[in-house]
Structures are given as structure tokens and as C-alpha cells.
Amino acid sequence: MSTPHGAIETPVFMPVGTAATVKGLTQGALEEVGAGILLANTYHLYLRPGHALIRKLGGLHAFMAWNGAILTDSGGYQVFSLSELRKVTDEGVRFRSHLDGSEHLLTPEKAAEIQLALGSDIAMVLDECIETPAPRKVAEAAVKRTTDWARRARCYFLECTKQNGDPGQWQFGIVQGATFGDLRRESAQQLIELDFPGYAVGGLAVGEPHEVTCEMAEEVTRSLPEERPRYLMGVGRPEQIPDYVARGIDMMDCVLPTRAARHACLYTSEGRVLIKNARYIEDQRPIDPNCDCSVCRRYTRAYLRHLFAAGEITGAILATHHNVRFYLDIMRQIREAITFGHLANFAAELRARYMAGPS
Amino acid sequence: MSTPHGAIETPVFMPVGTAATVKGLTQGALEEVGAGILLANTYHLYLRPGHALIRKLGGLHAFMAWNGAILTDSGGYQVFSLSELRKVTDEGVRFRSHLDGSEHLLTPEKAAEIQLALGSDIAMVLDECIETPAPRKVAEAAVKRTTDWARRARCYFLECTKQNGDPGQWQFGIVQGATFGDLRRESAQQLIELDFPGYAVGGLAVGEPHEVTCEMAEEVTRSLPEERPRYLMGVGRPEQIPDYVARGIDMMDCVLPTRAARHACLYTSEGRVLIKNARYIEDQRPIDPNCDCSVCRRYTRAYLRHLFAAGEITGAILATHHNVRFYLDIMRQIREAITFGHLANFAAELRARYMAGPS
């Protein structure tokens, strides 16, 4: 996948940098672990520091001094999950900021405008996110609205491109349809007509069983053109990632490696390590003996455990560094497994290691 | 100054790594900014994770994966400032842990024993810390007890050395005497008789005017042998450091660069920058245009301001990196100024820049 900020090997995992930073990692550390593309949250950046400021300062890449690629979400999901007093109409979604209670209206056009100001490499259209499990009627209405909004967003984006020249940004559509296979296919079909350069699968991994997530992802990827990137939003656990890739998913993002790290949960090739556990007090091994990251090359589990026990910020830094590196290495192994035709083996192996549960 | 973990150019500033970590910096970052020696707190490490564990894991250097030098304080100051229910007798100081309320007795021998277990390059003797301003009687008694304790600590240390071989550790005495010049000289004289390889000045910079700190430091350094390192504990502000050096101080430590960084106060060659201030919202300059650290080479003030406004951990990381680098660079400039014989000029210049107050 070729972006204005470098070529990205797929399948790819995007670390989450909500407020123009991956919590606990410097941009130098992100380069060191091999991150080629980050996700940043439009909702957060719109509210603080504001997209107008970021545009004035040269766009998000210049603002955060990140030369890799950036995907921005539309802000929709955060409006639905973080803000108060949201009201959805055909026009858009009206909400109050979770920061200061100020009122805002996010429309498909506004979401596109904000992301053009941010200057991300990939922008997402505004979609309607619904709670799951959803009654069929609700899911149907959300698909209809999502398609209407996608059409408006696409028109707005193409109009801007016509007037201001190519912004060097891709706009992706988002397939909805809850857990109804036919609605998912219908949603995909309607978006394909709008000719997006890439497509996302939204509204999954929000509580439904993993099998259902996989089934829906497959319904969607089967309906989408093979040569365009397919992005499953908000996933996933290490042992689930190969399953999504096997179903044709090219891109993923998740807060798990970074959030878990801050809560002392480390991912390793031997399963999860809850590093605060007393069993690690004297453990002189690295976090993961099979990891070559700078944290595993230098520090012991005993030291990491001490840092977390003492509530030291350096614990979060080292753990986040390792976890992100671990996720990116899983992706490397998946790409390798695909090349050699044994993705299924790799998936089974990973699952077995993680089925044992955390230690 | 030559330690088992490398030669240290003096005058030197030691970043504070209380619990075997400089808050917000990895050991790699500490190497990058050029730190040659850190201070670690015996009180904290004794309580958590415990000196016995650290000895078992190969000593503090191995435990925290730090190949530079380490100075450990005696724990006395923290007992006096952090713990509850402390009771000082000739034997030592009895106190309750600020972590779990457990009762402990810290004696001169115990403080030496803990630091031998930690395996620091430089260990400090236990001294009696008193509140200032102190009545003369109280200061006299504290000097007497500090000398008694220093003698016991020295005997214990030399006995251990005799029995177990050279631990590769220097033990420093601590001069007390509050703000009484004659008591300071007396304290120094008594310690010199114990033949320490280095001496510290304790109980200063605890609220008295800067001129008094300087005066007392000078009283002490004049009394001490020139060829042995003189360490002024717990200082100081950037603009004060040249004054101490001018009075013969070789070593300093202070939480200021790291603590201020976490509170959004940045030190620059043009004075202090309170980065949360609205004036930096659009400021595209680096923190310090005259600094060559990796933070100043990459990020803008506008970005740093955003990170602090959003409460992002990465703000603390970047600010700490810069502030520690700034302090170490001040020390480099001081060493250079000494070589060229214009330390007084440098001191005046630095003072002028910082007199303007924070911006």
C-alpha cells in the first residue's frame, strides 16, 4: 500500500495515537519499533488543539513531527462513546464535548473537512455507530444513513479535490450492518458504487463472539474489490489477528497493546505476562526471550515488575515499547506465513499459546 | 573522578533516579543525554524492592541495567522528610515506612550495609538532618551525632572491606552544622580525621537564602582537602550552579530538572519556559533554539504545549529528556568556562537570563 508518507506492507497494524501521540512513546521510539502508519483520533484533535491550528502549523505530520503515514478516523465512534447529549439526525450528530461541555455538530462534510485540515494520509467517512446487539430495523436504518452520509462525504471530498487540487489523501468508506450478513453485503455494495480507494468494516468487535466478528468480516471482504485495502476497525487481540487476515483484512488498529502496557499486561511469544505478579520478583529473563526489541535486550522482568509496583512512569514507557513492537512483529510473522503458505499453522500456534491464559 | 563505572568529568550534575529509574527516561535516553552518574535513593530501594533482592539480582547496576556510575544517599534525609513517627537516638533513627507503616531502624551500620548490598559506586554515611533555621544548641548536637555516626559507618565499612575484599565503593562523609560557619568547619575537621575519599555538604538549600548556602559551602570547601571530591547535596537551580562551583563544589544532584519537567516547566538558555502558557500555542520554535538534544531537534513548543494541555505522558517524557540534557549541558559549559578562566562571566550571564523570570 503506497501512501504519500511511504509504502506500507500489508497486512498492517496501526498503533493508536489518539491525541497526536502514542501514549508513552516518542516518535523516535515508534520509528525504532518499525511503525509505518499510526491512527489518530479526529474527535480528540478537533476538540483539542483544533484542526484549524494543526492546519496552520503545517498539518498533523508536521505538528507531531511524524514522517510516517497517518490514518484518521471520522470522529464518529468517539462521539458515540465519549461525548454527552448526542443527537443523531439525517444532518449529522450533535454532541457535547467530554472536555468542556461545549456543543458541536459533526456532519459528513465537517468530518471530511477536519481530516483534510489535519492532512492525514487516509481519512474515514462519518458513519452511524449503533449499539450491538441491534434489532434488524435499527441496523437497516443505520446502513441507510451510513450510505447517505458516505455519499455526502465523498461528494464533499471530491469537490474539495477539484477546487484545491489533490490533497494527497485517501478517503475510505465504512461498511456497517451489525451482525446481519445480508445488510453487510448491501452496505458494501452501496459503498462500492461511490468508488472509495479503500474500505473499512465498522461496528464489529464491540462485544459479539469472535466467530461472529470473523463471519461478518468475511461477508464484507468477499463483497469488496480485492485490489483495494480492507480495514477492520478496532481489533484486536494478538491471537485473533491471524483470523482476520485469513478473511482478507489488510489493516487493523487497536488500543490493546498500548493500554494493556500501561496496566502492566505484556504480550509475549509465550502468552500474556501480568508483570505485577509476584512470580516475576526475581525473574531475570527479558519480557520475551524471543523478542529483539531494545527493552527485551536490556531489561529484566524483575526490573519491569519493580517499576510497576512502584508506580514509575518508566514502567509504562518500557512496556508500551515492547507491546507495540510485539504487535508489529506478529504482523511481520503473518506476512511471512502468507508468503510461505502456512498462515493457518501460525494462527493455530498463536492461539494455543494464548489459550493458556495470562501468567 | 574515576569510578568503577567510568571516569566522571567534574563538576558534575547527577540526575535523580529515586527508585532505580529517572522518572520518564529510559536508561538509553540517559546515555543519549550524556549522564555519567545517577543518584538513587537508599530509603526507597530499601523499602521497595529491598536491598537483599537487588543484591541477589547482581546489584543496582545490573538490576536497572545501567552501566554508568551510581551514588546512593544514606536514606537519612528521606527518613526525616517522608516517613512517620521517626525517633532519633544515638543508636540511629526509628521510623515507619511511608508505604505500609511498617517499623524500621536505620543505623549508621545499616545504612552502610544497605548501600554495600546495592553496590553503588559512591555511598553516603548516615547523618542527622535537622530543620532550619536551627538554634545553635540543636545544630551543635546534630554535628556531634553526625560525627559519631560517621565514625561508626566508617568502621563498619572498613571492617566489611577487610573481611570481604574491596567492594569497589567509595564512602563519603557528610558535613553538617546548619548555618554556623564555625560548626561547619568543626564538622569538616572531625570528618577529615576519618579519612573519607570524598565529602558532602548536607543540610543546605533547605530554605535559607542563596547567599547563605554559598557562604556555608565555601566555609566547608575551604576546610576540606582539595584533591577529594566535594558534593553539595540537593542543589540547585540552573543559575545557582555556577556559584556553587565557584566555591569549590564538584558534585551536585537535584530533582528540579526532572520534577519541573513533569510540571511543564522547561529550562532553556533564554530562561524558564512554562510551556502550558497560551503564548506557545502556535510557537513553532524548538524548546530551546540553542539546544542540540533530540527533543529540540524534532519537536516544536506548540506540540509540547498540546501534549501537556492534553495530559499526555509523552509530554513528561520529552520535557524530562530536554531538561536533563539542559542541566548536563550547563555543566559542560561550566567546565569549559573554568578551562578558559571565565566562570564568573558565565555565572553572571546565566543569572541575568534567569532573573527575568519565567515566560
Image (cartoon, coloured by chain):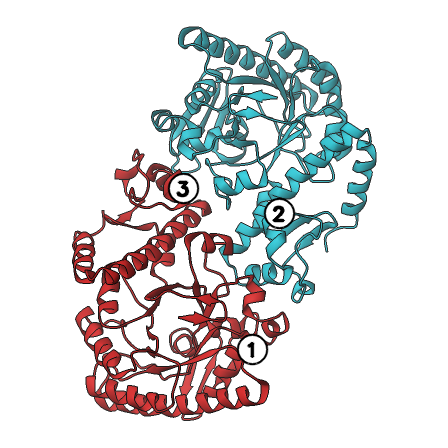
Chain colours: A cyan, B red
At 49% from the left edge and 55% from the top edge, which residue is drawn? A313
For disc 3, the neighbor class at 10 Å (few under 14, some 14 to 19, many from 20) is many
* B160 shown above or below A357: below
Residue receiving disc 3: B307
* A331 shown above or below A55: below
Quarter of the N terminus of chain B within the rendering: bottom left
* B293 shown above or below B333: above
Q: Where is residue A108 in the image (x, y as percent from the top left)?
A: 49, 17
Residue receiving disc 1: B117
The chain ID associated with circle 3 is B
Q: Where is residue A99 in the image (x, y as percent from the top left)?
A: 41, 38
Q: Where is residue B299 in the image (x, y as percent from the top left)?
A: 38, 39
Q: Work out whether residue A201 can be spotted.
A: yes
Marks 3 and 1: same chain?
yes
Marks 2 and 1: same chain?
no
The Cα–Cα distance between marks 3 and 1, rounded to whole angstroms, is: 40 Å
The Cα–Cα distance between marks 3 and 2, rounded to whole angstroms, is: 26 Å
The chain ID associated with circle 1 is B
Disc 3 on helix, strand or loop?
helix
Residue receiving disc 2: A293
The chain ID associated with circle 2 is A
Contact between labelled residues 1 and 3, with CB atoms less than 8 Å apart: no
Q: Which amino acid does label 3 sit on?
A: Leu
Disc 1 on helix, strand or loop?
helix
Q: Which amino acid does label 1 sit on?
A: Ala
Q: Say which quarter of the image contains residue B334.
A: bottom left
**Left or right: B262 as drawn, with respect to A182:** left
Q: Judge depth for marks 3 and 1 and give the one in front.
A: 1
Marks 3 and 2: same chain?
no
For disc 1, the neighbor class at 10 Å (few under 14, some 14 to 19, many from 20) is many
At 35% from the left edge and 81% from the top edge, which residue is drawn? B174
